[in-house]
Image: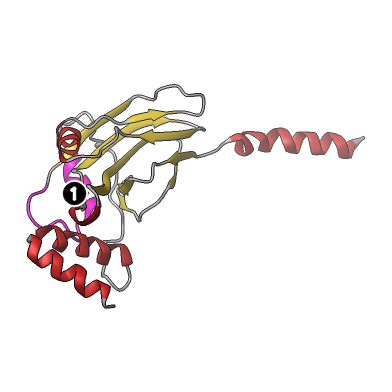
Amino acid sequence: MKKPILLLLTWLLLSPAISHADIQLILPTNVRVVAYNGQNSSDLSRLTLPDGNNQIALRFEGELGRGKDAEYVYSEVIVATFDAKDTDLSLNIPEIRSSHTLNRFNRDPQIKLTDATGKRVTCKMAVIKKEGFQIQRDYAAELVEFNRGDSAAAVASLKPAAVSWQPSPDSHPEVAEQMLHYWYQQADAETRSRFKQWLETK
């Protein structure tokens, strides 16, 4: 009799730890989380976060237009802060298919966050705007500065990542891709045409 009782007591003691689970955040294909909870992140379709208050920085990335008129674009970086526990969360943004809808999203980002039951989760949002060159941004450092402000999405207690972020195109292929997209957008129509012809010969 002692063994079953011992096993039962062990299960009761461990059950709180067993029942504890993190948050699984599921993202659409056109959304990239660039930083979360004080650290930079890679392109992910699913993100594991701890229970409680979380802060993510995300942006829309996608192609607008078709054929030779297509253009790869990025939205402004959106900061979203929310509180959840032990659930799967799905994040969605409005459909962006034109420069008009992209500009509207940049001005007034509408992010929908729902839990596993379909219930809407309260999400505080703000935009981090940055002018000029956008490649190799240290989003974690930008969040540290953002959290010193008085935005409703700021988290004063959030600690920055201990390790600085120093990406390079060799170790981070997504950075090289971003650079290609950026310079393509800066080029005029004639330069883009020559670039496409060059790609066809490779």
- Tell me where the magenta segment starts and ends, as one range: 130-146
Q: Between 185 and 134, which is closer to the camera in this rendering? A: 185
Asked if residue 140 is among those painted magenta in the image, a careful observer would answer yes
Percent x, y of residue 103: 14, 37
Asked if residue 116 is among those painted magenta in the image, a careful observer would answer no
Q: Between 70 and 16, which is closer to the camera in this rendering? A: 70
Question: In the picture, which quadrant includes the C terminus?
Answer: bottom left
Q: Between 97 and 77, which is closer to the camera in this rendering? A: 97
| Colour mapping | secondary structure
In the image, 31: left or right of 18?
left
Asked whether residue 69 is in view, the answer is yes
Question: In the picture, which quadrant includes the N terminus?
Answer: top right
How many discs appear?
Answer: 1
Q: Quadrant of residue 82?
A: top left
In the image, 101: left or right of 14?
left
Location of mark 1 (residue): 142
User: At 31% across and 41% down in the image, what residue appears?
Assistant: 56
Percent x, y of residue 63: 26, 49
Percent x, y of residue 91: 38, 35
User: At 23% across and 60% down in the image, what residue appears?
Assistant: 178
In the image, 110: left or right of 146?
right
Q: Residues within 10 Å of mark 1 (few under 14, many from 20)?
A: some
